[in-house]
């Protein structure tokens, strides 16, 4: 019966690479057999195959994200994170008692996303505007040199200053952008681990 249960769990784990999926299932099969669980006890502890598979996938993607190194392609890590967020949202909506949490999370994600875009848009528009202003002042300064050297030098200096500010602050803004996104991901991961991780399967039923 336990093998049939885990076979059903396996059918929901297509998002996990085959070798890691089999290793994971083997671990839980040995754990269940060693503990001498009956089928009723397995369902009581882990929930239905679909619920258990969902919690395993969430834990898998959370752990994969936390141990991801710089060698992992950005596209793959982004895909894993999108999958994780989607699993958490679906998992929350699948549990009646967690629907309020799901609605709150979705609204928070939408609000955070809109706010995030607004902040980033404002910052980058400011950077582009400053850079354009600096280049404009620099070019005009060169032109004005033929009419008034002090005025031309003033414009050139102002243009170089504005351009320098952009060069200085651009990496800081990029790091800030990544930090804000990272905080959003960490919050979603906390929600998933708290309410849908394998240690909370029964709470979400």
Image (cartoon, rainbow, N blue to C red):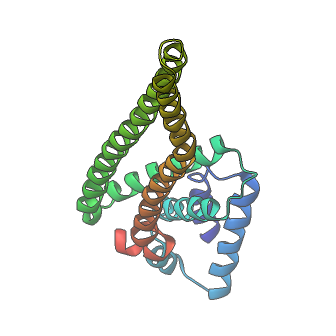
Residue 23 in the image: state x and y as whole percent: 74, 65
User: In this orientation, which residue lies closer to the viewer: 162 or 80?
Assistant: 162
Residue 10 in the image: state x and y as whole percent: 62, 56
145 up-or-down from 198: above or below: above
Left or right: 135 as drawn, with respect to 92: right
79 up-or-down from 31: above or below: above
157 up-or-down from 21: above or below: above
Residue 96 in the image: state x and y as whole percent: 26, 61
Q: Quadrant of the N terminus?
A: bottom right
User: In this orientation, which residue lies closer to the viewer: 175 or 71?
Assistant: 175
User: In this orientation, which residue lies closer to the viewer: 205 or 61?
Assistant: 61
Q: Quadrant of the C terminus?
A: bottom left
For the point 52% across and 13% down, the residue is: 143
Residue 195 in the image: state x and y as whole percent: 39, 69
For the point 57% across and 47% down, the residue is: 171
User: In this orientation, which residue lies closer to the viewer: 7 or 18?
Assistant: 18
For the point 56% across and 64% down, the residue is: 56
């Amino acid at each position: 019966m336990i093998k049939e249960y885990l076979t059903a769990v396996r059918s929901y784990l297509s998002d996990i690479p085959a070798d890691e999926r089999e290793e994971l299932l083997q671990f839980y099969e040995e754990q269940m057999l060693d503990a001498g669980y009956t089928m009723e006890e397995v369902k009581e502890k882990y929930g239905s195959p679909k619920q258990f598979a969902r919690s395993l996938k969430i834990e898998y993607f959370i752990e994969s994200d936390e141990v991801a190194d710089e060698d992992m392609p950005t596209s793959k890590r982004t895909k894993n994170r999108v999958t994780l967020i989607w699993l958490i949202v679906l998992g929350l909506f699948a549990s009646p008692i967690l629907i309020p949490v799901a609605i709150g999370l979705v609204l928070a994600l939408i609000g955070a996303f809109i706010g995030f875009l607004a902040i980033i848009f404002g910052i980058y528009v400011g950077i582009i505007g400053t850079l354009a202003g600096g280049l404009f002042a620099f070019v005009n300064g060169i032109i004005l040199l033929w009419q008034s050297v002090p005025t031309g030098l003033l414009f050139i200096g102002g243009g170089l200053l504005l351009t320098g500010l952009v060069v200085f602050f651009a990496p800081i803004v990029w790091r800030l952008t990544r930090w804000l996104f990272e905080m959003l991901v960490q919050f979603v991961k906390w929600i998933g681990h708290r309410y849908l991780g394998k240690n909370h399967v029964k709470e979400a039923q």
